[in-house]
Amino acid sequence: KTFSDAVNSYLKRRAHTSNTTTDYLVRFMSEWDKMGVQQIDQTFLEDWLDTRLDAVKPQTVRREINAFMPVLRHARKRGWVDEVPDIERPADGEPRLRVLSEAEYEEVMDNHEDDNAGSVMALFLLHTGARIGEAVNLQWTDVHAGDHPYLTLRTRKRKGGKEATRDIPINAVIMRVAKAKFGTQSEWPEQGRVFSYWDDQRAAGKAVMRYVHGLGIKDFRPHDLRRTFATRLLLAGADMRSVADLLGHTSLVMVMRYAVPPTNHKRDLVNALGV
């Protein structure tokens, strides 16, 4: 059996596979298409790892390994390989902690354009804390109108692919953008994807990047908006349990990563000691 045979068999048995994992597997199928799955052994992967680490960041290599190793374990269950290589994943390094400064936040807010898809998505991420994949896949059936409108975000946990949901209140900023884009609540569509002009999160992410970079904001990634959402909530006095629920985290440990107070806030706290 080839590696492609193993991937196809693996995917048939999966209830859900993320777009990112699928993209990685499609690329590996292209590169390792005719290779017998038995050939992808310890020696082959160690050589591949040495070469790959010279080309991309360790974080990327980890994600690639996390994509194809389940396929090799599946091949072992099917009896197509005798054993699964024990490859050591490179360290992830320090987690990214970038959040928008107050000035950058104001830039994003003050320069919003209702007819700019990247700008609309940027504000949505900034005021819901959604992952960009959750936003792109948001259905109108999960947008609930009423006196206290809210939306339901859906994501799949890595372990077992089980779906998890959480409800996010729709604040005044999102209501204003929605009204400009879709009309009043009574005019909102009843079905389909809210952000239907994008087929996947990669295209949406690029649009957000173009908009934010166009404002002169450097070193930016779309996920920084999710961290900014969490950080601003914490600085406003929100308790960590509530922030964890809004982010969809079951552990407060992950929320601590988002609790990155800006320099001026830390300066004010220390200066207050001298008053």
Image (cartoon, rainbow, N blue to C red):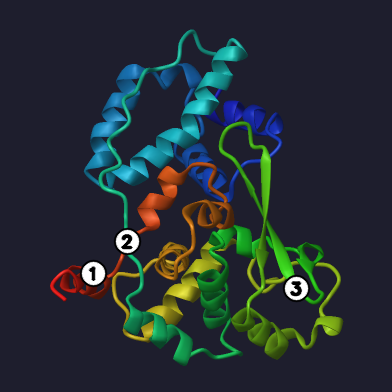
Residue 180 in the image, given as x and y percentages of width and height: 69, 90
Q: Which residue is mark 3?
A: 148
Q: Which residue is mark 1?
A: 269
Three-letter amino acid code of the residue under disc 1: Leu
Q: Secondary structure at mark 3?
A: loop
User: Which is nearer the eye, 167 or 16?
Assistant: 167
Three-letter amino acid code of the residue under disc 2: Val
Quadrant of the image for the N terminus?
top right
Q: Which residue is mark 2?
A: 260
Residue located at (31% from left, 65% from top): 261
Residue 98 in the image, given as x and y percentages of width and height: 32, 64
Residue located at (54% from left, 69% from top): 125
Q: Real-space Cα distance between discs 1 and 3?
A: 35 Å
User: Which is nearer the eye, 64 or 245?
Assistant: 245
Q: Secondary structure at mark 1?
A: helix
Name the N-terminal-most of marks 2 and 1: 2
Q: Is residue 1 visible?
A: no
Q: Quadrant of residue 90?
A: top left
Residue 224 in the image, given as x and y percentages of width and height: 40, 65
Q: Closer to us: mark 1 or mark 3?
A: 1
Q: Closer to us: mark 2 or mark 1?
A: 1
